[in-house]
Image: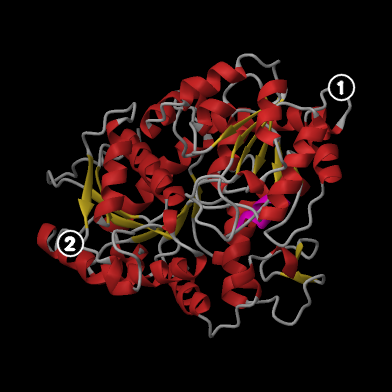
Amino acid sequence: MTAIKMNTNGEGETQHILMIPFMAQGHLRPFLELAMFLYKRSHVIITLLTTPLNAGFLRHLLHHHSYSSSGIRIVELPFNSTNHGLPPGIENTDKLTLPLVVSLFHSTISLDPHLRDYISRHFSPARPPLCVIHDVFLGWVDQVAKDVGSTGVVFTTGGAYGTSAYVSIWNDLPHQNYSDDQEFPLPGFPENHKFRRSQLHRFLRYADGSDDWSKYFQPQLRQSMKSFGWLCNSVEEIETLGFSILRNYTKLPIWGIGPLIASPVQHSSSDNNSTGAEFVQWLSLKEPDSVLYISFGSQNTISPTQMMELAAGLESSEKPFLWVIRAPFGFDINEEMRPEWLPEGFEERMKVKKQGKLVYKLGPQLEILNHESIGGFLTHCGWNSILESLREGVPMLGWPLAAEQAYNLKYLEDEMGVAVELARGLEGEISKEKVKRIVEMILERNEGSKGWEMKNRAVEMGKKLKDAVNEEKELKGSSVKAIDDFLDAVMQAKLEPSLQ
């Protein structure tokens, strides 16, 4: 625990930290894990503020958390989705099409007066919150924190490298005068770290500063760069270059406090997935390190053509696989699967051969990755999935589909050596032959093979992730030291407001 007694100061004043996440599962979960981490290290009172439905989701997760949560509160901020052109009862990204996701981003600004009202009712001007931690996408919160005399702190739920690329591209739009196949340099990045327009998500590829996405992201990210400092859900030892770039670009203190992910058992119970035992039973029949796990996360899917080629390639590889499959792009992602989206008789053949298992809803991913039979992970390269895979020592096939996922994959492939790109986006070409070849490669374990090297590198990264959160005094990990340093810094800023 940090040397400063955070629960009370010398005058007996209770310290509070407020936290405001963006409304998406991939942001809500790390925010809750950060709240638990902060509470463990300080016993400061933590209040997470979000919309009513997201507050319910957080309460559900908190109820199943393995650590005492007595110092964590979850507060609802009023929100009416229909006031912002969103469907009734929709308060996060889970069931939204891309055009509506941008409306959700813009709708977050409506929470500003409700956050101010909460602070004015629960804190006096003389005793504001110790700090207000907000999502990197919610830059407007930083101004609220300043206005109430508190300290605004950004939390990026992504990695250091991916966040740096995302922020740099949105702020400067350096790709505008390049064709899709041309490489372009990024402000703040080394000369040899260039990107192609084709790696960008389509809404960013065509952003010009006047579109709805730019109108939200540019001012919000720029305001976030005026904060006291940033917390990053990553580990210094696995992203040395990423942290160097992020610090150089933002010119702010950056604390690497990851990996903020739940334990496999805890994650499984909180998801309340009755099919978890069925997955484990099926996996237990397979050889160690032999199964490819496939999941594109809670919000992403691939095109019908891509789905057909992926299935054909998997069958041709004759390698066992567990595929969390959703309706393809162009259909409701929660729609039931149709036979015509897969090769004729595919699922039945996979059952008979006992080669593959199709799963039609998200399963307990951490529990699956933790299973000894898993030898590779075909992923969209969302940062939470990357951390979960690395912690379990599982190498990856990358298929980035949105956000900063392509930049994450570039770092995994070029710097860490734990991943290989299979395809890129919804427009990316994919063939049965390529799938077969790359699936066979990642599951190869002969000494000296590419798959063997990737596996060893992934195991090495997993050890670094686990070491980073070691709380034993003599072996205190880098992320534990960072969270303690952060707590000391915000306390010092409270005592000396000129530091804010």
Question: Which residue bears the numbered disc 1?
Answer: 446
The one nearer the camera, 494 or 392, is: 392
The residue that label 2 is drawn on is 119
* Left or right, residue 14 beside residue 66: left
Instruction: Tell me the distance, in whole angstroms, between the alpha carbons under discs 2 and 1.
Output: 60 Å
Residue 484 colored in magenta in the image: no
Foreground disc of the pair 2, 1 = 1
Amino acid bearing label 1: Asn
The answer to whether 176 is drawn above or below residue 91 in the figure is below
Task: Name the residue nearer the viewer: 118 or 422.
Answer: 422
Quadrant placement of the N terminus? top left
**369 or 263: nearer the viewer:** 369
Q: Which residues are magenta?
A: 404-410
Residue 255 in sight here: yes
- Identify the residue shown where x is 64% and y is 14%: 285
Above or below for 149 versus 8: below
Residue 496 is left or right of residue 310, and the answer is left
**Residue 112 coordinates in the image, percent (x, y):** 27, 70
Q: Is residue 133 left or right of residue 377?
A: left
